[in-house]
């Protein structure tokens, strides 16, 4: 009888509720490459200021290095040529030596707030990274 009384006082149908997710979904391990693409790190003013953009890129590279060896990092900015970098405009690409390290960094950095903005992480190919790295007119880079 005591067990029945205790059962009657429990909340009916206690459900596990997934946390509300705002923004893009977190990166999937199956999509991981050597290159992590981070968005929302720059305001428009920061992106237009080469010194400010370089400082943020250096901080980002240092943070990314906590997850493994970083082979290079760059931010895509408006260049002389114009439209080449448009889909990646304002994004930061970080190239890791190992895919597992890139995934660990993407998973950890996705959803963090940077200057009040939620960071989103996804992946790109090494070829994408190299194409921007070769074009000094649209990037600020650090090796």
Image: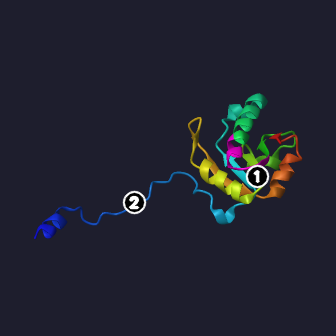
Q: Residue at x 81, y 57 (%)?
A: 126
Q: CA distance from mark 2 to mark 1?
A: 35 Å
- Snapshot quadrant of residue 14: bottom left
Query: Is residue 77 placed above or below 20 in the rendered structure?
Result: above
Q: Residue at x 57, y 48 (%)?
A: 111
Residue located 79% across and 40% down the image: 78
Front: mark 2 or 1: 1
Quadrant of the rendering where the N terminus is positioned: bottom left
For label 1, the crowd category at 10 Å Cα-Cα, with few meaning under 14, some 14 to 19 and many 20 or more, is many
* Extent of the magenta region: 63-71
- Residue 47 lies left or right of residue 126; in this view the side is left
The disc at residue 17 is 2
Quick one: 24 or 101, which is closer to the camera? 101
Q: Position of residue 35 (x, y in %)?
A: 75, 54
User: In front: 112, or 90?
Assistant: 112
Query: From this viewpoint, which residue is outermost toward the left?
Result: 1
Location of residue 11 in the rendering, given as x and y in whole percent from the top left corner = 24, 61
Element at badge 1? Answer: strand
Q: Residue 52, image x and y in percent?
A: 73, 30
Which residue is at a point 78% across and 44% down the rendered structure image?
73
> Which quarter shows the C terminus?
top right
Secondary structure beneath label 2: loop
112 on left or right of 123: left
Residue that carries the numbered disc 1 in the rendered image = 96
Mark 2 packing: few (<14 Cα in 10 Å), some, or many (20+)?
few
């Amino acid at each position: 009888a005591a067990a029945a009384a205790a059962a009657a006082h429990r909340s009916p149908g206690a459900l596990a509720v997934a946390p509300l997710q705002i923004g893009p979904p977190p990166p999937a391990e199956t999509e991981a490459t050597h290159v992590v693409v981070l968005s929302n790190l720059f305001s428009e003013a920061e992106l237009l200021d080469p010194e400010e953009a370089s400082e943020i890129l250096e901080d980002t590279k240092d943070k990314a290095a906590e997850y493994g060896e970083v082979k290079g990092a760059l931010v895509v900015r408006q260049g002389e040529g114009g439209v080449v970098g448009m889909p990646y405009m304002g994004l930061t690409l970080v190239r890791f030596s190992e895919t597992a390290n890139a995934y660990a960094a993407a998973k950890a950095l996705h959803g963090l707030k940077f200057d009040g903005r939620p960071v989103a992480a996804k992946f790109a190919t090494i070829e994408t990274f190299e194409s921007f790295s070769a074009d000094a007119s649209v990037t600020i880079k650090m090796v």
